Image: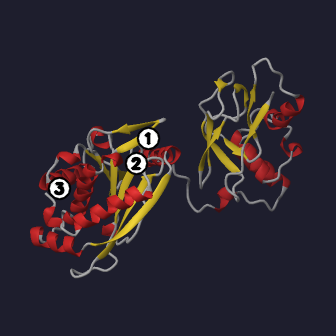
């Protein structure tokens, strides 16, 4: 029996997806439910799974290729000896016979070019070729590139790493978000009494991160991640926190953060932050088990962070909605992997964190 797997409609207004990850090959046995590939659009990443046991009889897409809704991705058969019906072969042969690259095929169909418009050329037909054909067919056609006021810019190494990090997190987690309003006036008064106003060190931010680590020590189930099909319980708490530099966003890791006292935590946190603006060590950027981010310095009063790969929880610290020393409500938000944690569990964590921040003198 032959089973044809095609590109599903992932989003209502998107006809195109990208084959972000294609780990299979023709001849490979598969079981029902096995992941065959990952498709990515602007709004979502979906996993394509096998509907049954069988073998990959034919594969029509490669990693990184753009594909259209309804396009055949692969065929699963009972064995490699099973013949593919002529109707199925004809279904996928047309574009390949024309020599279209994956991206060119998407653009050609979007512009309404027919096989007749595309024939008569030798070798591969590229995106540039497709736009040239569209101009020849329609003198009123405008290449989208002609309307761009500026040059195309290649991704830098930091941007490339951030893009890969975000995509990996989106593929491996089921994100959820919960927040709680916390009166941070006691925390602000405590910071002012202890350190005054420092232009170099944000002690309030550091104390929120420290209180978060202290609370996680009481809830070790949050210091976990889903790696493959197994839950990893980390032995120590390694805190990743966001640092924006001129080169881009970095997520340095404060290793074994749970073993530090308050002053040691603050000192290590800001020493690590300073290194991100100077000479960075690769060891400072790996090994995170939990995450922390803050946009309070920019006046942002609520934000929802993306989970860092290898973690299942991240705390978001924001600016207060009202800023005085009597009443200072601020939103603390938690992004978490719903595969591992429930809303009730996260609510309990936030409640303990709220209580810790309203009694900051107890944070040691």
In the rendered image, the residue lying farthest to the top is 81
| Cα–Cα gap, marks 2 and 1 | 8 Å
Residue found at x 67% / y 34%: 50
Relative side of 23 to 162, left or right = right
Q: Position of residue 148 (x, y in %)?
A: 61, 61
The mark nearer the N terminus, 3 or 1, is 1
1 or 300, nearer to the observer: 1
- Disc 2 and disc 1 in contact, CB within 8 angstroms: yes
The mark nearer the N terminus, 3 or 2, is 3
In which quadrant of the rendered view does residue 54 lie? top right
Question: Which quadrant would the C terminus be assigned to in this image?
Answer: bottom left
Q: Position of residue 44 (x, y in %)?
A: 59, 52
Residue found at x 89% / y 29%: 86
272 or 80, nearer to the observer: 80
Relative side of 98 to 150, left or right = right
Q: Which residue is mark 3?
A: 266
Q: Which residue is mark 1?
A: 226
- Disc 3 and disc 2 in contact, CB within 8 angstroms: no
Of the two numbered discs 3 and 1 in the rendering, the one whose residue sits closer to the viewer: 1
In the rendering, which numbered label is found on residue 312? Answer: 2
Residue 197 in sight from this viewpoint: no
Of the two numbered discs 3 and 2 in the rendering, the one whose residue sits closer to the viewer: 2
* Disc 2 packing (10 Å; few <14; some 14–19; many ≥20): many
* Disc 3 packing (10 Å; few <14; some 14–19; many ≥20): some
Residue found at x 34% / y 60%: 348
């Amino acid at each position: 029996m032959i089973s044809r797997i095609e590109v599903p409609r992932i989003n209502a207004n998107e006809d195109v997806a990208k084959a972000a990850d294609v780990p299979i090959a023709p001849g490979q046995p598969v079981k029902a439910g096995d992941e065959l590939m990952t498709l990515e659009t602007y709004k979502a990443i979906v996993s394509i799974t096998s509907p049954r046991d069988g073998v990959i009889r034919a594969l029509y897409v490669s990693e990184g290729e753009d594909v259209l809704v309804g396009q055949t991705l692969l065929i699963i058969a009972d064995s490699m000896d099973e013949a593919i019906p002529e109707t199925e072969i004809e279904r996928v042969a047309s574009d390949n016979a024309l020599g279209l690259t994956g991206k060119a095929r998407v653009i050609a169909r979007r512009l309404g070019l027919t096989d007749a418009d595309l024939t008569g050329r030798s070798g591969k037909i590229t995106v540039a070729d497709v736009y040239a054909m569209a101009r020849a067919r329609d003198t009123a056609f405008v290449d989208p590139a002609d309307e761009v006021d500026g040059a195309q810019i290649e991704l830098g190494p930091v941007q490339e790493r951030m893009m890969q990090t975000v995509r990996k997190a989106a593929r491996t987690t089921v994100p959820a978000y919960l927040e709680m309003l916390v009166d941070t006036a006691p925390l602000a008064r405590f910071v002012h009494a202890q350190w005054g106003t420092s232009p170099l060190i944000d002690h309030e931010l550091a104390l929120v991160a420290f209180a978060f680590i202290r609370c996680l020590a009481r809830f070790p189930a949050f210091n976990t991640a889903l790696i493959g099909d197994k839950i990893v319980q980390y032995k120590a708490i390694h805190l990743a926190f966001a640092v924006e530099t001129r080169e881009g966003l970095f997520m340095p890791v404060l290793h074994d953060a749970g073993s530090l006292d308050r002053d040691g935590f603050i000192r290590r946190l800001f020493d690590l932050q300073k290194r991100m603006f100077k000479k960075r060590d690769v060891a400072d950027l790996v090994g995170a088990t939990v995450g922390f981010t803050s946009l309070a310095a920019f006046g942002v009063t609520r934000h929802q962070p993306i989970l860092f790969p290898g973690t299942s929880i991240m705390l978001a610290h924001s600016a207060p909605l009202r800023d005085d020393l009597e009443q200072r409500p601020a939103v603390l938000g938690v992004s978490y992997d719903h595969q591992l944690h429930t809303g009730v569990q996260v609510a309990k964590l936030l409640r303990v964190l709220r209580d810790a921040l309203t009694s900051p003198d107890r944070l040691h």
